[in-house]
Image (cartoon, rainbow, N blue to C red):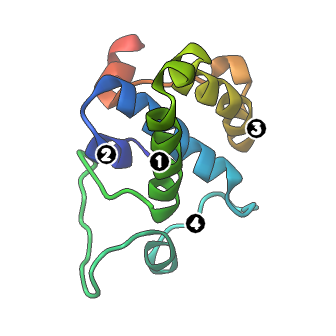
Amino acid sequence: IISLLNAMVSVRNNVMILTGLLLASLAASEPQSEGIPFGKPTREKYFQFQPGFLNFNHGGFGATPGLVREAQSGFVDQQEAQPTAWFASGGYQKILSDVRPRLAEMMNANSSDVVFLDDASSGLNAV
């Protein structure tokens, strides 16, 4: 997940919004009894890579899944339509609060143990 987020944006607020969007998309996806699927079917279903492109990402950056891009567009539209209302109502912080329990359930964790960070370095530094 971190590698996908690193490629999205570099502005702190947008990173937080997109983190919430990615996690919301994952939490809302089809239930998986064996975890989140990986491999060619997932790549073809969720990503927009050119035919024949093989992604050998080392984790520093990555592509954004189509579901996340669609959700991002909707949130950006809301923010741009009424910026003052967006931020006054909690903006991305409300989204993160709504996503936290869903993500915790998906990870079989306590909601209070789930935190959102800007990137992997922030996570390492927080430990």
Q: Secondary structure at mark 4?
A: loop
Q: Which residue is mark 1?
A: 72
Q: Residue at x 60, y 51 (%)?
A: 26
User: Do the residues under discs 1 and 2 have CB atoms within 8 angstroms?
Assistant: yes
Q: CA distance from mark 2 to mark 4?
A: 21 Å
Please tell me the numbered disc located at residue 37.
Answer: 4
Name the residue furthest bottom. 52
Residue 37 percent across, percent down from the top left: 58, 66
Please tell me the numbered disc located at residue 8.
Answer: 2
Q: CA distance from mark 3 to mark 2?
A: 25 Å
Please tell me the numbered disc located at residue 105.
Answer: 3
User: Do the residues under discs 3 and 1 have CB atoms within 8 angstroms?
Assistant: no
Residue type, numbered disc 1: Gln
Q: Secondary structure at mark 1?
A: helix
Residue 25 percent across, percent down from the top left: 59, 51
Q: Earlier along the polypeptide chain: callout 3 or callout 1?
A: 1
Q: Residue at x 48, y 44 (%)?
A: 77
Q: Is residue 23 above or below residue 84?
A: below
Is 8 on the left-hand or right-hand side of 20? left
Name the residue furthest front. 81
Q: Earlier along the polypeptide chain: callout 3 or callout 2?
A: 2
Q: Earlier along the polypeptide chain: callout 4 or callout 3?
A: 4
